[in-house]
Image (spheres, rainbow, N blue to C red):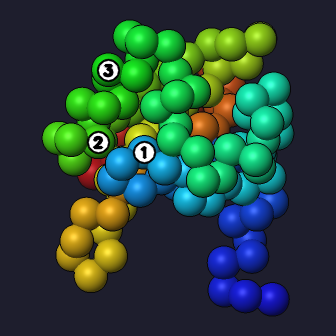
Amino acid sequence: MSEHDWIKQFPAAITVCDCDGIILEMNDKAAQTFERDSGYALIGKNLLDCHPEHARAKVEKLLDAVEKNVYTIEKNGAKKMIYQSPWFKDGQYMGFVELSLEIPFEMEHFVRA
């Protein structure tokens, strides 16, 4: 077992792209989420081609600005938190990681000191 095998079956969709938007890696949940768009066959493709124009422009801006983007969506009866963040290797910007995690519609929130 490699040190990153846990990612493959982690219950959040994880997609990794390079700074040009080329999909480098996906876990099982991401492949299942994007099954209609070919799932694992998306690896090596540009994620910009998977988005409608308004979303594509936003993703292009994020890739260029090297900024994170966090929001929630509701789709097919599920609420998800989408967390898109730049990733780095040896301090150099390498691209983006997107985590898509199903969350409850109502959930506890704690303020800790």
Quadrant occupied by the N terminus:
bottom right
Q: Which residue position holds label 1?
A: 21
* Residue at (17, 41) in percent of width and height: 65
The residues bearing labels 1 and 2 have C-alpha atoms spaced at a distance of 7 Å
| Disc 3 residue crowd, few under 14, some 14–19, many 20+, Cα 10 Å | few
- The amino acid pointed to by label 1 is Gly
* Residue at (21, 75) in percent of width and height: 91
First in residue order: circle 3 vs circle 1: 1
Q: Nearer the viewer, residue 84 or 81?
A: 84
- The amino acid pointed to by label 2 is Leu
Q: Position of residue 6 (x, y in %)?
A: 74, 71
* Residue at (22, 47) in percent of width and height: 66
Which mark is drawn over residue 57? 3
* Residue at (52, 37) in percent of width and height: 47
Secondary element under disc 1, as helix, strand or loop, is: loop
First in residue order: circle 1 vs circle 2: 1
Secondary element under disc 3, as helix, strand or loop, is: helix
Q: Position of residue 56 (x, y in %)?
A: 40, 22
- The amino acid pointed to by label 3 is Ala
Which mark is drawn over residue 63? 2
| Disc 2 residue crowd, few under 14, some 14–19, many 20+, Cα 10 Å | many
The residues bearing labels 3 and 1 have C-alpha atoms spaced at a distance of 12 Å
Say if mark 1 contacts mark 2, CB within 8 Å.
yes
Say if mark 3 contacts mark 1, CB within 8 Å.
no
